[in-house]
Image (cartoon, rainbow, N blue to C red):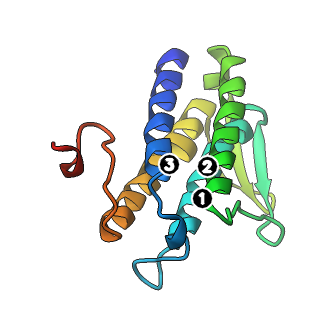
Amino acid sequence: MTLASLVAEYHQEMRTTRRLLERIPAGQFGWRPHPKSFTAGGLASHIVDCVDWIDRIFTRDEVDIDPSTFRPYRAASLHELLTAFDDKVAGSNATLAGLDASALTAPWRLKLLGKVRVERSKAEAFRGFTVSHLIHHRGQLSVYLRLLDVPVPGAYGPTADEGG
């Protein structure tokens, strides 16, 4: 796994994610498929939070979360969501552009109230906490769109909505 290949994968996934986020109906931000599920706006906001982890991973050696003070991002509108996503992606692009290959092997830790919960290389954290995590939630969001009868854009090929 090289820095260039990780960054190229990240850029592709961000383009795909942006296309999906754009399709959320503005009037459906509060919709959820099940009482235990995120709302559409909450799920999309969580996806934006996934992008924010890039800076937390590559600009720090550890992150210590206090659940009593941690506040996840919550967009109030589609416009706010897309603006935040674009801003986070731009900031992350700048962070990634400033890295060298040694950044991938540096250790990184996630703590909860001072207790280590995750310890892995920054490359593994980047892949798990941002790219893979975001892809997982993007898949959920594509199901939300399908249930709302919104045409779903392709991620790794065309969808039924695109004539695939």
Amino acid type indicated by mark 2:
Leu
Seen at 58% across and 67% down, the residue is 42
Alpha carbon distance from label 2 to label 1: 6 Å
Amino acid type indicated by mark 1:
Leu
Rendering coords of residue 34 (x, y %): 41, 82
Alpha carbon distance from label 2 to label 3: 15 Å
Location of mark 3 (residue): 134
**Front tag of 3 and 1:** 1
Question: What is the residue that sits farthest to the right in this orientation?
Answer: 69
Location of mark 1 (residue): 78
**Can you say whether 147 is above or below 138 in the image?**
below
Seen at 61% across and 24% down, the residue is 104
Amino acid type indicated by mark 3:
Leu
Location of mark 2 (residue): 82
Circles 2 and 1: CB distance less than 8 Å? yes
Rendering coords of residue 116 (x, y %): 71, 54
Rendering coords of residue 69 (x, y %): 84, 68
71 relative to 9 in the view: left or right: right
Most foreground residue, 28 or 117? 28
**Front tag of 2 and 3:** 2
**Can you say whether 4 is above or below 48 in the image?**
above
